[in-house]
Amino acid sequence: MTTEAVVPGVGELAARIEDGASLAIPPDYSNVPLAATAALIRRNARDLNLVAVPTSGLQTDLLIGAGCVASLEAAAVSLGEFGPAPRFTDAIRRGVLAMKDSTCPAIHAALQAGEKGVPFMPLRGVLGSDLIGRRPDWRVIDNPFGENDPILLLPALRPDVALFHARRADRAGNVWLGQRRELVIMAHAARRTLVSVEEIVDDDFLADEVIAAGTLPALYVEAIALAPGGAQPLGLEGVYEADRARLVDYAEMARSADGFARWLDHFLATKAAVA
Amino acid sequence: MSACRTDELCVAVLARLIGDASHVAVGNASPIPGMAALLAQSGSGGRVRVSMLNSRRHNAFTDGGRELFDCAGQGRIDVFFLGGGEIDGEANLNLVSVGDPERPEVRFPGSFGSAYLYFTVPRVILFREEHSPRVLVPKVSFVSAPGTSPDNVYRPGGPAALLTGKALFSFNKNKKQFRLESVHPGETVDTVRQATGFEFDTADEVTNTPGPDPETLDLIRGPVAREIGEAYPQYAARFVRI
C-alpha cells in the first residue's frame, strides 16, 4: 500500500459507498466521521443499511433524517446527555425504518466472527429477551459441549464498508487508533474500510513498537481522506471537544422536520466550507 | 441524617448497595450510579475498582467496546446498574418500546448491554429516579432483559435491588417479586403503593431509607461531584455547593 490510498476528500469516500451498502459506523464517543456523513448526504445516498458498533447517535440521526437509511442494526440510538435521537424516534414511530434491535455484546461478537472468517459466534445471556423473537437471523441451540444448556448463536457480521474518522494516518496508509479497538474490529470484519483523518504525517507507524500497537495497518484500508475537524460538532479524543451548544441546538431543532432541515442546511454548509 | 435532596440520597443508598464489591462497572448515561461508585470507592480507601464507560480517568479498558462485556462474561465484574423505560414486578426491563414494536407509541433508545449484563453480572442494581405507574408497570410491553430465567439457563447474575426516587426494594428471584424495604423521606407504604403499577411484597417492618451522614454528604457535594464532572460536566454542577 502506498499513498494511492489517499484520495482528494471526503466526497471521494462518499462516492465509494454505494446505495444499498451495509455500512458499519462507530458510537458517538468515538471517531464519528461527520464530514464524510455530510458528503454522503450531499451525494444523496439511499437505502443504506447501517450497523452501529454497537450504538450510535448524531450520525445515524442525520442519515435517517436526510432519507439515506433503509435499515439499522443497533443496540441503541440516542444523543446521550443531550436526549433522544429525534429523527430516529420519529422514523420508528412512523414505521418507515427497518429496525434490527440488538444488544451491545451481540454486535461486538458478530463482528468478531466476521474478522475470524467463521460463520457464527455464541453469546451468553439474552435468552428470554424479546429481541430474539424479532431476529430471525439469530438461533438458539443446545451447547454441543454441555447438556441442557441453551445458548444464543449470532451470524457473523461482514459489513460492506466500515467508515470512521481518526486522528492521523501515515504516508503508507496506516491509521493510528490508539485504544479505539472497536474500530479495529470493525475494519477487520468489513469488506472495505474508508477513513477520514485529521492529518497525514510523514512517518511509519509500524516502525515504532509503541505506536504500532495502536495502529490499524494499511492492508485493511481502501481509502483515506484528509478532513480536519472531521468529527465536529462531536469531539475527537485528545484533539478537540464537542461543540455542546450545537448539539443542544440539534436535540431541540431536530424534533421537527423543519427544524432538522434548518440545522442540516447549516451543517452541510459548514462542512462544504472546509471540505 | 442531614437534609439532602433525593438525588443525593440515591447516591448514598446506591453506594451502600455496592458494599464490598471489588469491581463496579457503570454504563453510559448513568451519572448517579457513577457518583455512587466513586463514593463507594472513596469509602473503601480506594479498594473498590470502578470502570465507568463515560469516563477517561475511571476507565482502565484498553481493548475496545467489547472488553467490558468479555470481562463480565468471565465474572470479573461484581456490580452493574441498569434502568429501563419500563420495569415490571418480575424485574423484566424494557428499553425498546411501548406498544406494537412495528409502530410503537413510545420508542426508547434501545437495549444497550442489558440483555447480556443482566445475566452475567452477579449483582445488578436497578435504578430509576422516576417512580410512577408509567415506569413501574404490571407487565413490560417489550422484554429487553428478563428478570428471571428457567433453571437450565446459564445465569450467574440478576437483579439484587431496585432503587427509585421514592423507595428501596429488594428482589426475590424464587418468588419473582420485589419487596419494599424502605421508603424515602416524605413517603409512606401507601404513597409508594399508589405510585407503583405492580404488586409487591412488603418487609415486616418497612423503615425510612437512611440518608447520608454529614461526612458522606460533604463527600458527595465535594470530591465526588468534582470527580464525576470529568465524565458528566453538565450534571456535576447540580451537586457542588460552595
Image: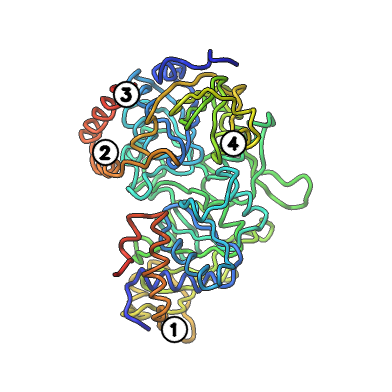
What is the x, y in percent for residue A38?
35, 25
Residue under the image location 28 percent in, 30 percent down: A267
Quarter of the view holding residue B87 = bottom left
- Chain containing the residue with disc 2: A
- Chain containing the residue with disc 1: B
**Quadrant of the snapshot with the C terminus of chain B:** bottom left
Quarter of the view holding residue A182 = top right
Q: Answer yes or no: is residue B137 visible.
A: no
Labels 4 and 3 touching (C-beta < 8 A): no
Q: Helix, strand, or loop for circle 3?
A: helix
Amino acid type shown at disc 4: Gly
Labels 4 and 2 touching (C-beta < 8 A): no
**Quadrant of the snapshot with the N terminus of chain B:** bottom left
User: Who comes first in sequence, dot 4 or dot 2?
Assistant: 4
Classed neighbour count for the residue bearing mark 1: other residues with Cα under 10 Å, few (<14), some (14–19), many (≥20): some
Residue under the image location 49 percent in, 86 percent down: B204
* Residue A274's disc number: 3
- Residue A266 in the image: above or below residue A132: above
* Residue A254's disc number: 2
- Which mark is in front, 4 or 2? 4
